[in-house]
Amino acid sequence: MDDRVWVKEPVESEAIKRLLEEYQFSTLQATILSRRGITEADDVKYFLEQELSYLHNPFLFDEMEDVVDRILDAVQEEEKVRIFGDRDVDGITATALLVEELRRLNVDVSYSLPTGDEPYGLLQSGVEQAASDGVTLLITVDCGISNIEEIVLANSLGIDVIVLDHHIEGEELPPALAIINPKMSGSEYPFVHLAGVGVAAKTIWALRFARTDLYRQELILLHAQPGNDTVIIQAMKVNNLLVTDRIIEEINPGVLKTERSKALAFLSCNVPILVLDAAVEHAQLSKAFGKSVDIHLLDLRNELEKVLPAVRNRGLFALTQLSRAARYVKGGRDELTTLYSLFIAYVLKKHPALDDEYERLLDLVAIGTVADLMELKNENLLMVRRGLKVLSTAPRPSLVPFLASLGLLNRRISSTEISWRIAPPINSTGRLGTPAVALEMLLSTDPNEIERLTSEVLAMNTERKRLSDEIWNVVRGKAQESFERTGSKMVILQDEQIEMGVASSLASRLVKAYNAPALVLSSSRSGRIKGSMRANDSTIHTRNFLEHFDRQGSYFLYYGGHANASGFTMESDRLEELMKALHEYVDTIDCPEERVKEYFIDATISEEEMHPELIRLVEFFEPYGEGNRPLVFEIQGAVVEEIGYLNNSQGGDRHVKLTIGYGHYRWPAVYWFAAPLVGKVFDRGSVLDILFRLARNYWMGNETLQLNIVDVKPTKAL
């Protein structure tokens, strides 16, 4: 039985036609979108749009006003504020952003990250220390949703707590002053997959908006247009740039008494009424209600034209036909919605702190989001894309030596570089118990200090690699035994030689090696053991798995995480009891079905389509990651013209370097770990069907396009 299957999902011709007509995609773009099920306006727009106005409004979080009000009170009253973050990349970047922003506001701000063997989250000792230091406001980032006792303690000590988190809540919420968490039940925020750093960035935007004259300022946007011997009046109430109410009424002049008009009642609420072209709007209102009704209007045209050149010499109807935002409105183009979109764009351009300056912090949002394996869909696509642009073209000074050391300065950085090059060194500082080193590197403004801290971060990464390789060689036998003992369901591994700092990376490595969930318990320190669990997409939900044991036996002092990555802390004296319970529970789990490796094909590329410009299509769909896998193309009847070999630095099968002839070009290609296939599956002169990813390859300062081969099959004779 062949354990590899090539899958090309069917496409809907009507969906492709609509994508071509409504959004002017190329045929290949529309085909790939349809094949991936990306056909709705709310999904399509994040591949097309670059403007930050398409991000969700942070005030969609129910308690965001409470958060910014409390922080601004702390600014005004010169209170001491402390940020509690996490030790991973997401927690470090989130803490960096919030500390940086509060320093910008001249707040007396400090931070605390888990060090040494300290567990994740807010600690009672940390709360007590904060109280001793005179702190009156604690803000947790990337943690806090499960710290009920600690927040009760903080409240008793006169400290307010704001929780900024993205982890799944437990049965009870902590008694914080305010909680911002997109995963919290009942949240009306429209996207649940923000990273902790994304939540921090949303809070920063709201904090900046709260310092404008529009914060809590209710206003009305109005448009009146002629109908069929009628006047159609549309209006919406807006607060913090959110639509809070909306009305549409068609008025037959002279028939409806003004006192019975719902639209007139809607407008009679003593708030500013904004329009485009007041004279035109006044004429329609006079026609609807008579000249005796005087409605004061504020004309936006002059202000809009200062920052939005496209508005000049165009009315709302013409602007609606040109509007990109109008393409995504359900029910078709709407002139009032166009006015609303223009107003938002105007506000962002008028206040650079909400737009161009805000973009500068998206570099860390990109790093934290990709590193934490958040889904790259919806607004994450836009934030990460803009963040990658910053990293590639104008990185913050504190990252310049770091990127230079990695060979990434002054070149195009993708999400792949974050995953494999940028995130691991930052992560290593937390895994080795000193995340403050990476945090201080990000926060520092002193060039000499940045250089020193960069060297420390890179040295820690080297040390973690060494420790990981050493422990891998030590535990491989035990891992195989565990895999067999569980009936190939998962790997459960505990060894006193496993340091806390390598448990998570070891678990990830085991998942790849065995294609099964892995739970790794570190060595005992101070009477406690830390555990790290990882899984792949189709198996166990790691947090739910841990929750089962906590409910059954209250094994954990703390646990938390996501679907594919979770962790816990427990008392050492309960290890034997937990191991017994783990194996008993795994015995009850059904054996996994025989796994067949499926390769999903995005498009079959003809010889005419196979040209260097194809990389533009690849980059259109970036950034890649969770929920947005890299494009995989198929070519049929390609010729293997040359074969060479590359050594595998980790041992094992060598890699194969090839030259592939297809169409009008000869393509350099690499096929990882494929040396055993040469002479068996293919050789020089073989004609193959090939699955590949197209990428840019950088070597010795030169950039070339390269096929990264995923799988091959001999071409079937016709």
Image (cartoon, grey):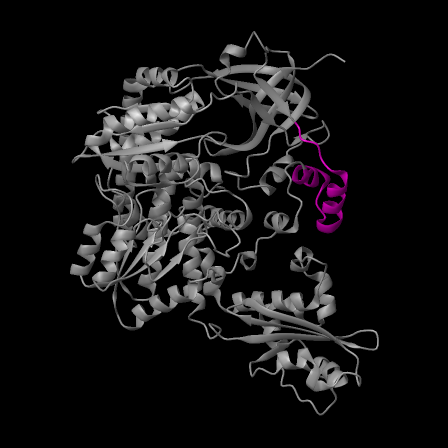
Task: Give left or right: position of 138 versus 533.
Answer: left
Which one is in front, 101 or 448?
101
Task: Give left or right: position of 480 versus 202.
Answer: left
Magenta region includes residue 11: yes
Magenta region includes residue 543: no
> Is residue 406 in view?
no
Q: Is residue 145 above or below residue 711?
A: below
Q: Quadrant of residue 180?
A: bottom left
Q: Position of residue 324 (x, y in %)?
A: 66, 58
Q: Residue furthest bottom?
A: 292
Q: Is residue 304 above or below residue 371?
A: below
Q: In which quadrant is the C terminus drawn?
A: top right
Task: Give left or right: position of 589 versus 150.
Answer: right
Q: Position of residue 594 (x, y in %)?
A: 52, 18
Q: Position of residue 716 (x, y in %)?
A: 71, 13
Which one is in front, 486 or 248?
486
> Is residue 15 in view?
yes
Task: Give left or right: position of 139 versus 713.
Answer: left
**Residue at position x 45%, y 67% in the image:** 209
Q: Is residue 355 above or below residue 268?
A: above
Which one is in front, 170 or 243?
170
Q: Quadrant of residue 82?
A: bottom left
**Residue at position x 64%, y 33% in the image:** 612
| Magenta region, main secondary structure | helix
Q: Which residues are the magenta region? A: 8-34
